[in-house]
Image (spheres, rainbow, N blue to C red):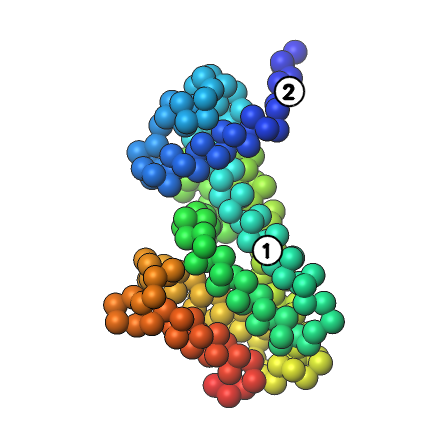
Amino acid sequence: MATVITKDANKEDDIIQAAEKVFFSVGFGNAKMEDIAKEAGFSKVTVYTYFGSKENLYMALSLKAMQHLIDGLYECLDKNQGKLGLDVFMAMAESYLAFCVSHRNYVDLMLNYLSMVRMTVAGKKLDKISQAMQSSIYYRKIRGVQNVTIDLTVEEIKRGQKDGSIKTTKSPWLIHHVMWSMVTGYAKVNYQPSAPEFINANNDEWKALLLQTVRSICLDKI
């Protein structure tokens, strides 16, 4: 009979936090489980007992990043209850933009995951990734929530089209994808998003123009 291991949630979280520091410091390829164990203050055996592989631990951190974004969008929805669809959608766009500025490493994690989705043709060709990644329970968990942000945002765009605050008849998914790509592009291109400017462009003006463009699309002015 297989031994059932009871895991301590606090210890598991400590390992994930340690992995976050190591991965963000040296990158996934250069990170070693013994370095993560040392950072967490546990033995390498303990880290492997909890996560099994570096890939599983990387996916656990990727799930943490995505869940952080999802929680932020739910909080945004809660704060903007009763408002028109356009106003809620724009609040969500601003929330995502703030997330990208404050958590650029998390954005990298999510984009790396999306690259994996593209490489595996949305999970249909798993032979494109390692066996360790395929067997990662966190890889399976993140696949279960990967479209939540899209679903939440599209729902508000549809509501805005229904209540008349969003004038365009363009596909709600298209509107979401344009917003998402613009905000994500800002975070990827601008390696100093919190600084006053980036290569002679004022960052506040950049963000304001980005959001203004998204709003103009919603109002059918573009």
Could you say which quadrant of the image residue 182 lies in? bottom left
Nearer mark to the viewer, of 2 and 1: 1
Residue at 71% x, 81% y is 163
Q: Nearer the viewer, residue 140 or 33?
A: 33
Residue 22, x across and y down, in percent: 38, 34
Q: Nearer the viewer, residue 88 or 219?
A: 88
Measuring 47% from the left and 20% from the top, which residue is drawn there?
42
Residue 21: x and y in percent read: 41, 36
Q: Are the residues flagged by discs 2 and 1 in contact, CB closer than 8 Å?
A: no
Rendered position, 60 above or below 47: below
Residue 170 in the image: state x and y as whole percent: 56, 80
- Going by the numbered disc 1, the residue's amino acid type is Gly
Give the residue furthest to the front.
196
Near-viewer residue (112 or 203): 203
Above or below: residue 152 compared with residue 114: below
Q: Give the quadrant of residue 29.
A: top left
Q: Is residue 131 visible?
A: no
| Number of numbered discs on residues | 2
Seen at 40% across and 71% down, the residue is: 204
Look at 37% across and 61% down and name the residue there. Answer: 193
Eyeballing the image, is 210 above or below 219? Answer: above
- Residue found at the far bottom of this picture: 221
Q: Seen in the image, is 60 located left or right of residue 22?
A: right
Residue 145: x and y in percent read 60, 49
Quarter of the image where the N terminus is located: top right
Q: Which residue is mark 1?
A: 72
Q: Is residue 126 above or below residue 56?
A: below
Which residue type carries mark 2? Thr
Name the outermost residue toward the left. Answer: 199
What residue would you read off at disc 2? 6
- Disc 1 element: helix
